[in-house]
Image (cartoon, rainbow, N blue to C red):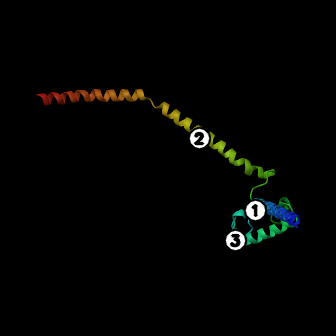
Amino acid sequence: MKIQNGILAILLALVLVVGLAQSAKAAAMLGDLENALMCKCDDKCGKVLINCTCSTSDKTRAEFSKMLDSGLTVQNIIDMQVEKYGETVLSSPTKSGFNLTAWAMPFVALLAGGFGVSKVIDAWKKKGDSHDPVAEDEDDSSVSAKNSSRIQDELDKIES
């Protein structure tokens, strides 16, 4: 009797572990779906499904859970949603065709911006180099020569 109870306890524990593993896998699959798709609210919130808290998103999550339980894969469900709503339902653009520009443009913009900033800095450096400090010193010395004779005259007047 004790052996049967022990075997029964082991089987029950095994069923629980398998059940927990399957529910964890289902939750992960649902999370993948929620990250891959946009919410299709009536108020057009524009949020990724995982971040949306409206009633429509709750219904969509329940529907997706049923689909996953029925044996559909994440990709099957995504394909069904794209067929129903178009590519706008995807949270990120596909990596093919014209959509490649959405992936490439940020890098192109960074490179172009960096190139433009370097050109501006080079122009500022050249503008700074064309400013002749020797000419300024000559101007200062000529001004000081004129003023020094005047200052000397004033000092001579004070001494006398």
The answer to whether the residue labelled 1 contacts the one labelled 3, judged by CB atoms less than 8 Å apart, is: no
Does residue 29 appear to the left or right of 116 in the view shown? right
Q: Secondary structure at mark 3?
A: loop
Is 40 rendered above or below residue 124? Answer: below
Q: Which residue is mark 2?
A: 117
**Place of residue 156 in the rendered image (x, y in percent of width and height, measured from the top left):** 15, 27
Q: Which residue is mark 1?
A: 34
What residue is rendered at 52% in x and 33% in y? Answer: 126
Does residue 61 appear to the left or right of 125 in the view shown? right
Q: Secondary structure at mark 1?
A: helix
What residue is rendered at 81% in x and 70% in y? Answer: 63
What residue is rendered at 80% in x and 65% in y? Answer: 85
Q: Quadrant of the C terminus?
A: top left
What residue is rendered at 84% in x and 59% in y? Answer: 75
Instruction: Quote the CA–CA distance across marks 1 and 3.
Output: 14 Å
Q: Which residue is mark 3?
A: 54
Mark 3 vs mark 2: which is more N-terminal?
Answer: 3
Give the image quarter of residue 11: bottom right
Q: Between residue 19 and residue 55, name the one nearer to us.
A: 19
Three-letter code for the amino acid on which mark 3 is drawn = Cys
**Place of residue 96 in the rendered image (x, y in percent of width and height, measured from the top left):** 81, 51
